[in-house]
Image: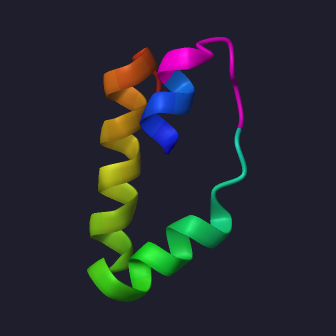
Amino acid sequence: NLGPLLAAVPCIKEVSIGHALIAEALDAGLAATVARYLAIIRATNGDG
């Protein structure tokens, strides 16, 4: 949901993703999950 949210509301500067990030990290690993989230952020608004 992060990508569509950032694309729809580009002025967002901060979101609370802690629970989702940790839940995904339990399955995929923390490094892979953080890399995925950073890729989503960079793809939608160029920051990160």
As for residue 1 lying within the magenta part, the answer is no
The image quadrant that residue 22 belongs to is bottom right
Q: x and y percent of residue 48 in the render? A: 46, 32
Question: In the image shown, does 29 or 2 lie closer to the viewer?
Answer: 2
Q: Residue at x 63, y 16 (%)?
A: 9
Count how many numbered circles sit on residues in the image: 0
**Left or right: 25 in relation to 14:** left
**Left or right: 38 in relation to 5:** left
Q: Please tell me whether the stretch drawn in magenta is mainly helix, strand or loop.
A: loop
The image quadrant that residue 24 belongs to is bottom left
Q: x and y percent of residue 7 in the render? A: 48, 19
Q: Which residues are magenta?
A: 7-14
Question: In the image shown, does 28 or 7 lie closer to the viewer?
Answer: 7
Q: Residue at x 65, y 65 (%)?
A: 18
Q: Residue furthest bottom?
A: 26
Q: Residue at x 72, y 51 (%)?
A: 16
As for residue 10 lying within the magenta part, the answer is yes
Q: Residue at x 41, y 78 (%)?
A: 25
**Left or right: 5 in relation to 16:** left
Which color mode does the image show? rainbow
Q: x and y percent of residue 39 in the render? A: 30, 39
Q: Residue furthest top?
A: 11
Question: 12 above or below 20?
Answer: above
